[in-house]
Amino acid sequence: MNSITNNSHDVGLFLKNHGIKPSYQRLKIYSFLFENRIHPTVDTIYKNLCPEIPTLSKTTVYNTLNLFIQKNIIQKLVIEETETRYDVNTSTHGHFKCENCGKVYDVFLENNLLHSSNLENFKVNETHLYFKGVCEKCIKSIKK
């Protein structure tokens, strides 16, 4: 997991250390991801930052996120074909998407559960593990 605080100096230094020029938009986009662990879409990021950065465009958000992916400081989640989300947590973990409320949760598994003897002679570059169902919060609200 990235070891920074939500201070803009730390975010700027973090971006520089990963070969990224820390422009104002990049600082704000990364800070939003870091402070809001909600696995947002481009639209969510754009709508949340637009009031503070009126000149921000969706293209800038897309391009910034793609740069962050290239530099391995965020990961792209495609749980549904029609929706792309972004995660600041780059450690190996899975995700659970609630089919009722749409929220995406991090799921941490024991490393040995991801090990497969069928892959011993392969080099794995990415691991994606997704679960879909109904989250605990929605189950409780449905029972009421």
Image (cartoon, rainbow, N blue to C red):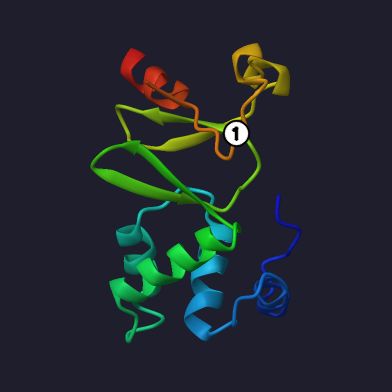
Residue at 66% from the left image edge and 12% from the top image edge: 117
Q: Residues within 10 Å of mark 1 (few under 14, many from 20)?
A: few
Q: Is residue 70 above or below residue 132?
A: below
Left or right: 13 with respect to 82?
Answer: right
- Residue at 67% in and 20% down: 120
Q: Residue 19: horizontal and vertical position, in percent? A: 65, 75
Q: Quadrant of residue 118?
A: top right
> Which residue ends up furthest to the left in the rendered image?
82
Residue 73 figure quarter: bottom right
In-front residue for pair 111/36 = 111
The amino acid type, in three-letter code, at marker 1 is: Val
Residue at the extreme right of the image, as rendered: 3
Image height check: is 91 above or below 67?
above
Q: Quadrant of the C terminus?
A: top left
Q: Residue at x 45, y 51 (%)?
A: 86
Q: Report x, y in % for residue 29.
A: 49, 70
Q: Which residue does the numbered mark 1 point to in the structure image?
A: 124
Q: Nearer the viewer, residue 14 or 120?
A: 120
Secondary structure under badge 1?
Answer: loop
Horizontal side, residue 93 vs residue 2: left or right: left
